[in-house]
Image: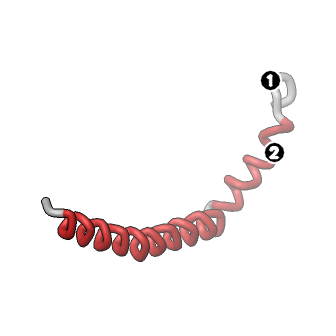
C-alpha cells in the first residue's frame, strides 16, 4: 500500500469514527438518561435506594 493510499484510508476512517462515534455516544447517553424513566423504573430505583440500609438482621 502506498503512502498516499494509506493516508486516504486513515483520513476516511478518522472521518467515519468522528461522525459515527459522536452519534453512537449521543445515542448511548440518551439511553442511559432515559432508562430510569421506563415503566417499572421507580420500583427498581426505590429498591436500590433502600438497599444500603438492609443487612442480614433487618432486611
Q: Is residue 4 visible?
A: yes
Q: Quadrant of the C terminus?
A: top right
Residue that sits furthest to the left in the current view: 1
Residue that sits furthest to the front in the current view: 3
Which residue is at a point 82% across and 28% down the rendered structure image? 55
Which residue is at a point 56% across and 72% down the rendered structure image? 30
Tell me if 44 is positioned left or right of 51 in this view.
left
Which residue is at a point 32% across and 72% down the rendered structure image? 11
In the image shown, does 32 or 9 lie closer to the viewer?
9
Tell me if 16 is positioned left or right of 2 in this view.
right
Q: How is the image coloured?
A: secondary structure
Tell me if 30 is positioned left or right of 19 in this view.
right
In the image shown, does 26 or 20 lie closer to the viewer?
20
Q: Which residue is mark 1?
A: 56
Element on which disc 2 rests: helix
In the image shown, does 31 or 17 lie closer to the viewer?
17
Tell me if residue 22 comes above or below residue 45 in the rendering. Answer: below
Distance CA(mark 2)–CA(mark 1): 14 Å
Percent x, y for residue 8? 24, 72
Q: Which mark is residue 2?
A: none
Tell me if residue 9 comes above or below residue 45 in the rendering. Answer: below
User: How crowded is the residue under tag 2: few (<14 C-alpha within 10 Å), some, or many (20+)?
Assistant: few
Q: Quadrant of the N terminus?
A: bottom left
Which residue is at a point 60% across and 70% down the rendered structure image? 34
Q: Which residue is mark 2?
A: 50
Amino acid at each position: 500500500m502506498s503512502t498516499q493510499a494509506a493516508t486516504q484510508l486513515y483520513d476516511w476512517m478518522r472521518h467515519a469514527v468522528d461522525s459515527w462515534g459522536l452519534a453512537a455516544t449521543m445515542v448511548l447517553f440518551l439511553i442511559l438518561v432515559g432508562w430510569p424513566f421506563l415503566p417499572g423504573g421507580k420500583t427498581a430505583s426505590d429498591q436500590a435506594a433502600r438497599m444500603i440500609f438492609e443487612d442480614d438482621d433487618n432486611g
